[in-house]
Amino acid sequence: MPVTKKLGAYILPKDHRTLRGIFLLFVALYFANLCVPLIGAISHTERMWLSSSVMIGLLSLVILIKTGIPERSKLFIGLFLALLAGLTQAWTGIITFLAFLASMRMMETTEEKLVVLRLPATKSFVLGVGIGVVLGVVNLFLSEAPKGFAPTVDALVLSLNPGVSEEIIFRLFMFAFSVYLLGGKIKSRRESLWIYVLMIVPHVLLHFPDQYFVGDVLTLDLGVVIISPLVASLLFGLPMTLAMVKRDLTAAMLIHTIVDYLRFIFIGLPF
């Protein structure tokens, strides 16, 4: 990747090449995860989720140490969202908190912004619930046959974990970090395209590593490697990303939470 030199130090170019480089790095780590033998009971999918979350958490911490914390109101919002995400996994709540604060801090220094809740709030809730129900039904049709109907509190609590944490860690943070690397402003359609790629594709691919194995044998067939992630990106990743970019974080979190909640109450909890 070409670089520019400034005051004797090499820095990444502030254009789409930087974002493309980040994506290629993710792809390299992704396939390395498939090739490295497992240690212990953790699966390839679990290991990729864990390593990706930890890396973003550490990067968020570095950014906060370097740039400082955001304004006080963002601290309280971040704490509330972290508590929702951490109801079932405390470490997820911690990483959500760090990623949210880092995202808010980076966007305080950039021209491009994403908001937590845009007024009027009712529009965000209607949009989030409406799209969430539609995508939730689509997800049920694409999944295994429903096993019943159990709208439990456990299902709601469990659905808040991915609904809040994943939208912050893997979507909000990727937007803020991308714009931050671009120097604070999106200057071309190519840069916008790569931001969308980073907000959608890595998060979608994190769901698939275990599906590449038949038994213990790595089997990379066309359907699992390309078609399934492409369908998931277009049907789920893109609408949630558009909701966040065009409306706000709240709408995206509602969509994600409802999709998972409908899955849990009709198909069952994952554990």
Image (cartoon, rainbow, N blue to C red):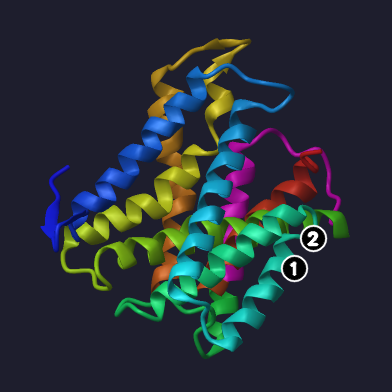
Q: The residue under label 1 is which amino acid type?
A: Leu
Q: Nearer the viewer, residue 110 or 85?
A: 110
Q: Is residue 268 magenta?
A: no
The image quarter containing residue 92 is bottom right
Q: What's the amino acid at mark 2? A: Leu
* Numbered tag placed on residue 265 in the rendering: none
Q: Which mark is residue 87?
A: 2
Residue 166 occupies which quadrant of the picture? bottom right
- Cα gap from disc 1 to disc 2, whole angstroms: 6 Å
Q: What main secondary structure does the magenta stretch of the protein show?
A: helix
Q: Is residue 18 left or right of residue 153?
A: left
**Side of 119 where 17 appears, left or right:** left
- Rendered residue at 50%/68% (across/down): 65
> Badge 2: how crowded within 10 Å, few (<14), some, or many (20+)?
some
Residue 83: image tag: 1
Disc 2 on helix, strand or loop?
loop
Q: Is residue 264 left or right of residue 207?
A: right
Pick the front one: 133 or 11:
11
The spot of residue 227 in percent (x, y) is: 40, 31
Residue range in magenta is: 128-152
**Image coordinates for residue 74, horizontal then vertical, percent:** 57, 82
Q: Contact, CB < 8 Å: mark 1 with mark 2?
A: yes
Residue at the location (63% across, 54% down)?
Answer: 259
Q: Residue at x 29, y 62 (%)?
A: 181
Query: From the viewer's perspective, is 229 left or right of 124?
Result: left
